[in-house]
Image (cartoon, rainbow, N blue to C red):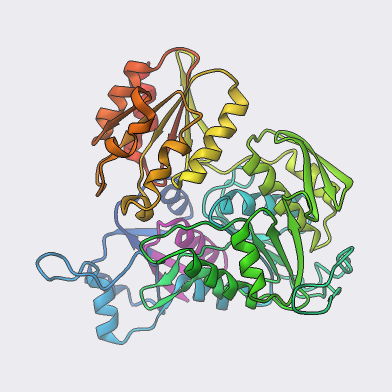
Amino acid sequence: MHIHILGICGTFMGGLAALAREAGHRVTGCDAGVYPPMSDQLRALGIELIEGFDAGQMDLGPDMWVVGNVVSRARLADGSPKYPLMEAILDAGAPYTSGPQWLAEHVLQGRHVLAVAGTHGKTTTTSMLAWVLEQAGLQPGFLVGGVPMNFGVSARLGNCTSNDVLSAAGPPQGAKAPLGGSAVHAVTSVGAPFVIEADEYDTAFFDKRSKFVHYRPRTAVLNNLEFDHADIFDDLAAIERQFHHLVRTVPAGGRVVVNGLEESLARVLHEGCWSEVRSFGSAVSDFTAQGEPDAFDVLERGTPVARVEWALNGVHNQLNALAAIAAAQHVGVSPAQAAQALGSFRNVRRRMEVRGEVRGITVYDDFAHHPTAIRTTVDGLRRKVGGARILAVFEPRSNTMKLGAMKAQLPWSLEQSDLAFCHSGGLGWDAVEVLMPMGDRVQVSDTVDGVIAQVTSQARPGDHVLCMSNGSFGGIHERLLAALA
């Protein structure tokens, strides 16, 4: 079929486009304000990109319009529609669907879906899990909200012809009785594995359920759960409810892998769980780690079963690894096999990615934007560089941060940095006042140019400049490297 994707340059919709193209469909799409890496990936696949959402695109006459959640019924100040194409689709009675629903019906049907959910670490953990299954010879399909450097693409169909990939795996070892039900030990032949990043953000303007409700996973990872997405969720309880909707879709023969450190996830499971549960992270969890995040032993119920030695740092990545190991075990990959695969794991683009070094000053790019993610990212870099100076450069760009939710946590999140620089453009709150507890260690500017000037005046050889944003940040990485040269 010919599908036309509205909002094609988002990480999810861009991955969906790649899968549809690989499956033989004709794919076109539109978006506004596109930027790499997704725009580069789509052009490399030969997918036609149209700038904007003008109604003239109706002339394309696709078989299906696939609508991203960036699209809404919003009106501009003059009363005209912000997305004229969507209005035209509705007026014409043309067939349309959401990205997650199209994916569920055309890609995930008949697959063993391994879904990775959580406030933080979804992209990294999904990439880890896909790489572990790849190294085990399972040739998984995957859709990741970024570009894993081990694969070079954000999505692929993988081995979707075999129906017996799991037949040799047998039952999960040491399965214990799940909450609310009896133990079910059989992993049956349910299709080739597909690993997907399972986002709790809403599906589309006409479907306000979380995206992950569409995926029907047999293996579900609940990595962590904090308040986020203040633009669509009123409180943490509202997000917990969506996570429980995900748990409800996991079959009795499935597995829920849960972070044992999170009280919010304990509440989710307390609502009811009908599948095998395996935990990680806490002292009494099924899977625990012993050692530093860059080299540690993996213990399964107190018994050493594997050792991970890799290039990543940070306790958050150690926990991500445990989650991936526990999930991979459900499709027959032993912890030892998984740990060996993680030794060659390369992270996702924009996850502590070194963008360059000038005069002994290293510039990094990271996607961190939630206060907890910022703190764990800075902590991971601190463990890596020891006493060297860290200059944390960030913009509170997500809808949650723009609204001011959790702004009071920012000084805490930046605690381990030596200097911090905040881009305050577009905020509805006073960044100077919020960051005042940091004293003279922080500077604020409402323009990217101003931030660059502040950083270049302070940076010196041996420094590590960590840029954090969930957007393009005005191309700050290349501009900083040029200014520092």
The residue drawn where x is 61% and y is 69% is 268
Q: Is residue 456 above or below residue 128?
A: above
Farthest residue to the front: give it.
Answer: 437
Quadrant assignment, res 341: top right
The residue drawn where x is 38% and y is 29% is 438
Left or right: residue 379 compared with residue 41: right
Left or right: residue 397 compared with residue 427: right
Magenta segment includes 21:
yes
Q: Give the range drawn in magenta.
A: 1-28
Q: Is residue 338 above or below residue 80?
A: above
Q: Position of residue 266 (x, y in %)?
A: 65, 64
Q: Where is residue 429 in the image (x, y as percent from the top left)?
A: 26, 46
- Nearest the camera: 262 or 121? 262
Farthest residue to the left: give it.
Answer: 78
The residue drawn where x is 40% and y is 61% is 8
Left or right: residue 433 compared with residue 227: left
Q: Position of residue 70 (x, y in %)?
A: 35, 64
The residue drawn where x is 42% and y is 36% is 411
Left or right: residue 95 compared with residue 172: left
Q: Can residue 271 be seen in this view?
A: yes
Q: Is residue 405 above or below residue 449?
A: below
Q: Quadrant of the C terminus?
A: top left
Q: How many marks overall?
A: 0
Q: Can residue 157 be seen in this view?
A: no
Magenta segment includes 231:
no
- Nearest the camera: 247 or 219? 247
Q: Position of residue 238 (x, y in %)?
A: 47, 70
